[in-house]
Image: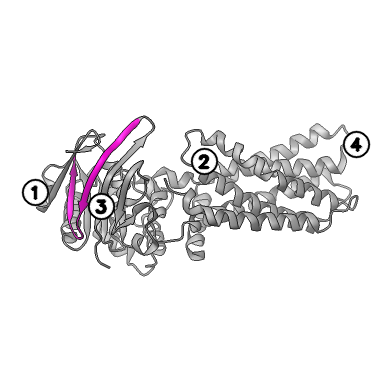
């Protein structure tokens, strides 16, 4: 199953390298959001670290939703999803492959976005970077897992562009809370420590198990 | 792998208000080839997708060797192929990459995809992305993809649409090669096809088997 999932993820990366449909839009969105919020808060000295932490996580989540809208777009163009569903593979492999691709897209986007965020908000020293990066990786995994599951749920709906954010955003609220707590804690101003990171890891595990068990029924008619 | 029997029992499918297929009863014996004829909207595509397990019946059942088609296990799916109105290919990949993906997902990475493309008259287009292909070329590639893993159940939905004379010859050759060896169900507007293949015809009209 892992081989099939990797094959599907690889196809999605190849398509993205050739078409630049998803990552480019995500990059523009997250960079614009960070810059706009930076200028919006520039006159407010009291906004400080908490605002910077909060805006990073809000930008990450909304950027992820933008990418998730295209999760199965390539499979729908010419009906490739039918071929995947009929292939002798575990249907969870389709979901895992798509989630891995989304995870990769988020990582690529954040490789650009986090330095911008850092440069704009923390000229005089910021939070512990390893903590923030670990939180982001764990959160990206959770968002990709949950988002791909929701994208599969919304696949057959005519209003899937509206339905997807409605399904995803409530489910990722715990990720945002843990992410903000971990980031703010990484300033050393509050006790953050390992607890929010542990929560993010647990969240990922729960949704791996949930999606694994339901993907057979979610994908298909 | 032996060809399977496909059975639809009182099988109906409704899309919202529209009843696309009404209480269809049909048994396709193992190794039999049948041609579904009928006007547009008669229910041919719906019947094929039900038989493939890509749609769940609203009522009744669609079974392959007695197994519910929608929950066909992997070993049964390994011998199935369905080609519908769309090519089921990735438009951003080349012809070769599409067939290689299909081969990998079917656990047959050693399939000689270049030989298959040559056979389909697409050998010189192997490295081209298929979003530049004509309808007929996509149809040929879809046919090659569907048969690449030597399925024992082949479901084809209007496979001749968009094909030129060479493409039709390839299709006829593929279908003839499968006679008696695999179970084949072909939805078509070609009224001569059953005679050419000397096989049974099923006629559909307004969602019902005539």
Residue that appears at 39% across and 62% down: B74
Label 4 or label 2, whichever comes before in sequence order: 4
Label 3 or label 1, whichever comes before in sequence order: 3
Quarter of the C terminus of chain A within the rendering: top left
For the stretch drawn in magenta, the main secondary structure is strand
Q: Dot 2 lies on which element?
A: helix
Task: Identify the residue position indicated by label 4 in the image.
Answer: A46
Q: Which chain is home to disc 3? A: B
Outermost residue on the bottom side: it is: B110
The answer to whether residue A6 is left or right of residue B196 is right
- Tell me which segment is drawn in magenta: B18-37
Image location of residue A94, percent across then percent down: 49, 55
Q: Nearer the viewer, mark 3 or mark 1?
A: 3
Q: CA distance from mark 2 to mark 3?
A: 31 Å
Give me the disc on residue B7: 3
Q: Which chain is home to disc 1? A: B
The residue carrying pointer 1 sits among few (fewer than 14), some (14 to 19) or many (20 or more) residues within 10 Å by Cα, namely few
Give me the disc on residue A154: 2
- Of residue B44 and residue B160, the one placed in the foreground of this image is B44
The residue carrying pointer 4 sits among few (fewer than 14), some (14 to 19) or many (20 or more) residues within 10 Å by Cα, namely few
**Picture colour scheme:** one colour
């Amino acid at each position: 199953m892992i081989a099939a999932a990797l094959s599907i993820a690889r196809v999605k990366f190849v398509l993205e390298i050739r078409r630049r449909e998803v990552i480019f839009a995500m990059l523009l969105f997250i960079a614009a959001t960070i810059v706009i919020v930076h200028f919006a808060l520039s006159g407010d000295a009291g906004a400080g670290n908490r605002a910077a932490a909060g805006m990073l996580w809000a930008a990450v989540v909304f950027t992820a939703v933008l990418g998730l809208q295209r999760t199965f777009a390539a499979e729908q163009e010419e009906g490739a999803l039918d071929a995947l569903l009929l292939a002798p593979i575990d249907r969870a492999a389709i979901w895992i492959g798509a989630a891995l691709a989304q995870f990769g897209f988020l990582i690529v986007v954040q490789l650009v976005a986090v330095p911008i965020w850092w440069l704009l908000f923390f000229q005089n020293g910021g939070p512990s970077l390893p903590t923030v990066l670990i939180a982001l990786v764990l959160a990206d995994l959770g968002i990709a897992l949950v988002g791909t599951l929701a994208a599969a749920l919304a696949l057959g709906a005519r209003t899937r562009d509206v339905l997807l954010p409605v399904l995803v955003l409530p489910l990722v609220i715990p990720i945002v809370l843990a992410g903000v707590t971990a980031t703010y804690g990484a300033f050393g101003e509050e006790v953050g420590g390992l607890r929010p990171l542990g929560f993010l890891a647990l969240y990922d595990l729960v949704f791996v198990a949930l999606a694994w068990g339901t993907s057979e029924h979610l994908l298909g008619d | 792998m032996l060809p399977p029997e496909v059975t639809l029992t009182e099988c109906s499918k409704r899309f919202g208000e529209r009843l696309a297929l009404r209480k269809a009863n049909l048994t396709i014996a193992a190794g039999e080839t049948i041609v579904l004829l009928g006007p547009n909207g008669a229910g041919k595509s719906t019947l094929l997708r039900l038989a493939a397990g890509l749609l769940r019946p609203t009522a009744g059942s669609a079974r392959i060797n007695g197994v519910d088609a929608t929950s066909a296990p992997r070993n049964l799916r390994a011998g199935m192929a369905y080609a519908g109105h769309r090519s089921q290919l990735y438009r951003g990949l080349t012809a070769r990459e599409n067939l290689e993906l299909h081969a990998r997902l079917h656990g047959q990475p050693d399939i000689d995809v270049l030989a298959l493309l040559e056979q389909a008259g697409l050998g010189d287009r192997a490295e081209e992305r298929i979003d530049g292909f004509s309808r007929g070329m996509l149809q040929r590639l879809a046919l090659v993809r569907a048969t690449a893993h030597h399925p024992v159940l082949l479901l084809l939905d209007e496979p001749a649409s968009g094909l030129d004379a060479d493409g039709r010859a390839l299709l006829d050759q593929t279908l003839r090669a499968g006679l008696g060896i695999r179970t084949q169900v072909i939805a078509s507007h070609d009224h001569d096809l059953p005679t050419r293949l000397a096989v049974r015809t099923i006629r559909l009209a307004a969602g019902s088997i005539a």
